Image (cartoon, rainbow, N blue to C red):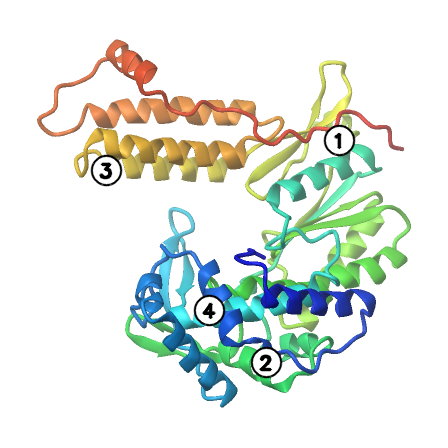
Amino acid sequence: MQYTDVGKTWMKLSLITGHAQRDHSFKFTSLAHLLDVEYLRDCYQSLNRNRAVGIDNISWEEYGAELDKNLEQLVSRLKRKKYKPQPARRVYIPKNEKETRPLGISALENKIVERGITWILESIYEQDFLDCSYGFRPKRNCHQALKKLNDLIMSQPVNRIVEADIKGFFDNVDHDKLMDFIRIRIADTTLLELIGKFLKAGYIDNGQLVRSDKGTPQGSILSPMLANIFLHYVLDEWFETIVKKHVKGYCELVRYADDFVCVVRYAEDAERIERALKNRFNRFGLEIHPTKSRRLTFGRFERENAKAQNRKPNTFDFLGFTHYCDISRAGNFKLGRKTSSKKFAAKCRDMNDWLRAIRNLVKMKDWWKILAAKMRGHFQYYGVSENSASIAKFYRLTIKMVLKWLNRRSQKRKMNWANFTKYLEHYPLPKPKIVHKFYVGRCKAS
């Protein structure tokens, strides 16, 4: 939660948190009244004011010009149950060279109300969510998930990995089953109806209204919370209370949004877990991707086993990194990781396309700042322990691409490598560095 002010809003939410924390079976019957003018003003102030506009074509600044009036009218419609979320404006962003990913851009009032509902749900469900979940949660992020995975493989008797991909998760979540899960904690019919309206709002695609009978709208503020609630009951809680009781050895789950891996000790447990995952998700109307999901041998004995079996050691991808079995300078097992080949190729391709497009549009001093920000962002994400080589390679390739496109500007004198190096000395670009240091060293495990 982003705190914009200390006031009644946070007092009310803290009371909800207290109730949820003290009694995990407590059902909340009165929540919708929290969506008043003062509360929604905080929601409005918390929004990113530079985001793209939805089908209403209203920006953050335009709505704020008459904020009190607009919020009073919004609250009036909410109280009279006349508020109807507008469909999202669907756009498509590149997923890879061949595929695109759909994204919904919400209207501004949708964003305000979604933020309000999300904060309410967060106050309740953060008391229920388990430690294995890292995606879209306060004070949790993907690097913590990667560190957790690192620590488990290094310190626990892990010999198997079960990696699973939920096929089209955000597009296929069953609305009825999701609402049943929400009713476990919430009995406020007004709030439940409002959440249902957002699920059914649909989207505008190429001028056509498409109604939604399943799925959570990707790109909306509310969607990640709803996804976490659904996966908390379908996966996290089930794994903790059922799966762990029916295996012979050690197993653990690490999940970031709909991306997760299971670390397992015994082969028979890994086989049972893989089979159980398929059955579990089928029961709730979802499918484990048949080609993107697998179980594999992995861990401190993987290199020796692979050598004995005359094969390459297994690797697996998680959150943009390829994880592999490595050895330290002392000859001990350690978990290695590097930017996955697909992600690396995509990042280089994106950088090349951007440099080619920008070189003649604006002055060099202006796009140089953007280039620095892009490189800094890459190192901020991929600068993790054991990934020095990959980020150094990205730096070198980027520098080469910059020089190439500088020399292809129209009617500009070409710059040789020596002059370019001098230019970099005066206007340096961010150097690759390890930002997230979470390698824990060697721990014994049987």
Instruction: Measure the alpha-carbon separation of dots 1 and 2.
Output: 57 Å
Q: Which mark is residue 188?
A: none
Question: Do callouts 2 and 3 mark residues in contact (Cβ within 8 Å)?
Answer: no
Q: Is residue 276 visible?
A: no
> Of circles 1 and 3, which is in front?
3
Q: Could you tell me which secondary element the residue under label 1 belongs to?
A: helix
The picture places residue 98, in percent across and down from the top left corner, at 38, 50
Q: Are marks 1 and 3 in contact (CB under 8 Å)?
A: no
The residue that label 1 is drawn on is 302
Mark 2 vs mark 3: in front: 2
Q: Quick one: label 1 or label 3, which is nearer the N terminus?
A: 1
**Is 36 displayed left or right of 178 in the figure?**
left
Q: Earlier in the sequence, mark 4 or mark 3?
A: 4
Image quadrant where one finds the N terminus: bottom right
Q: Amino acid at mark 3?
A: Ile
- Give neighbour class at mark 3: few <14, some 14-19, many 20+ (Cα, 10 Å): some
Instruction: Look at label 4 and name its amino acid.
Output: Ile
User: In the picture provided, is 119 more to the left or to the right than 78?
Assistant: right
List the residue tagged with mark 2: 33
| Vertical placement of residue 222 versus 312, above or below | below
Between label 2 and label 4, give the one nearer the viewer.
2
Residue at which label 4 appears: 112
Q: Residue at x 36, y 54 (%)?
A: 50
> Badge 3 is on which residue?
358
